[in-house]
Image (tube, grey):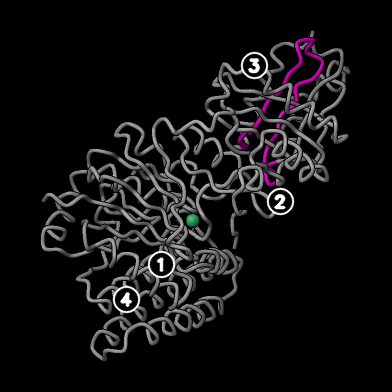
Amino acid sequence: MTRPLRIMKFGGTSVGDAACIARAAQIVAQAARDSSIVAVVSAMSGVTNSLVAAATRAQSGDRDEGARLAGELRRQHELAIRALVPQQDARASLLRQVDEHVAEAQRLCEGTALLRELTPRTLDAVSSLGERLSAPLLAGALVQAGICAQAVDATELIVTDSHHGGAEPLRDLTRARALSRLQPLLQQGIVPVVTGFIGATPEGVLTTLGRGGSDYSATILGAALDASEIVIWTDVDGVLTADPRLVPDACTIPEISYREAAELAYFGAKVLHPKTLRAVMDAGIPVWIRNSFAPDHPGTKITPKGRTNGGGVKALTAMSDVALISVGGPGIVGVPDVVGRTFSTTAAVRASVLLISQSSSQNDICFIVSSSDAKRTVEALREEFSQDLAHENVEHITLDPEIAIVAVVGENMRGIPGIAGRTFSALGRDNINIIAIAQGSSESNISFVVERGAMKAALAAAHREFGLGARQHGLPAASAS
Ligand code: ASP
Ligand code: MG
């Protein structure tokens, strides 16, 4: 097989309705002219949310939830099938598959309501149904477009550990299964349309890779099959210099490195699941982010080394659903192992820490967790340090929910002096107060904390300072949807 192999993943909005699915099919059909294609699909947009919400409501005993969900899913998918597949037999077979999956969703919700218990394993089974519903739809649309295509359940391909809700792939087993299942299809010129987001343990128990995990599915398969590239089709023009809803002048970055993209994903730029690039780092396979609503736009290419834009800073990102916790007081110098105890406590309540800052005087340790973890974390800390609080060795454990993290990202910032200085002077000129600062030793990210109300202004100031804007390059600003 001499044709290059490309993995094409379509996100939820890119298969959001019949028109979007038809557009995705056109993109695949065109690419299939000169390469072998494996398509990977997300659930139609909103479907996974509905599934998770229904299962959660069922858990509190609502017996009608299953039927309600079934009605909603059936309506949405049948509508798309009727628009996409005029041919009677094909349509009937697709409608039958929808029925089966919808019935399964209903049964699972009814079982959950009966038991008033929702195990992670059951939640995975419910939330996987969106992809199992959408993959046959795209396959059907491809067949309509004259392409041989077949829906394939990723439980047959991606072998994972049993960590429900965030499973990790087992590389060798996945490679063996993916090759033996997909290679014969590709050799016959068939486009496999694989369900994103899901996998199965070696024993065959269904798992999911975590919300947004279809991107990861695409790179896992790309690595397993030694693909020449992976294209993530989404609803924005690639990776942008900043969120265009916050910075109207943001524009697409033509090429960035794995590390930069991962850093952006981790700090809340929603284009990629944070684990996506892990799967392809060793093999160095390029990953494109492109807009299925604007397929002529070249998008962003993510490569091992990226390409410099001359300035060091590539992009900005921000997170506002976070809270600042601080543990401190002059007495903490004398408290044994404050740092160790603080972070073993956060670990014990499974709060993930997004940023840490401690001054060398040790008066204060402050760190950031996501808002949903904040209350739990503070309570656990007050408990852990109750003695020290009583003796006033630790004076305060406080929570500030009204903050945001802004991060300045760029791999080539390393070794370029003055970037932190320029960032903070720019903010200072605009009267933006900085609450805390952190820079990882990788030097590809400088993060700082500001009041939530100042986040937008902070982004604008840094974006301007580093000349990231479209207008500064004489380009049109990115279109955001
Ligand atoms: N459908 C899943 C979710 O919404 C996975 C994905 O879209 O990537 O989280
Ligand atoms: Mg997604």
**Residue 146, how many percent across, how many down?**
22, 76
**Residue 95, how many percent across, how many down?**
33, 84
**Residue 244, how many percent across, how many down?**
65, 52
* Dot 2 crowding, Cα within 10 Å, few <14, some 14–19, many 20+: some
Q: Secondary structure at mark 2?
A: loop
Q: Earlier in the sequence, mark 4 or mark 3?
A: 4
Alpha carbons under labels 3 and 2: distance apart: 28 Å
- Circle 4: residue type: Ala
Tell whether 42 sits left or right of 224.
Answer: right
Quadrant assignment, res 197? bottom left
Residue 352 is one of the magenta-drawn residues:
yes
Q: Secondary structure at mark 1?
A: helix
Residue matched to label 1: 129
Q: Earlier in the sequence, mark 2 or mark 1?
A: 1
Residue matched to label 2: 246
**Residue 22, how many percent across, how many down?**
38, 75
Residue matched to label 4: 141
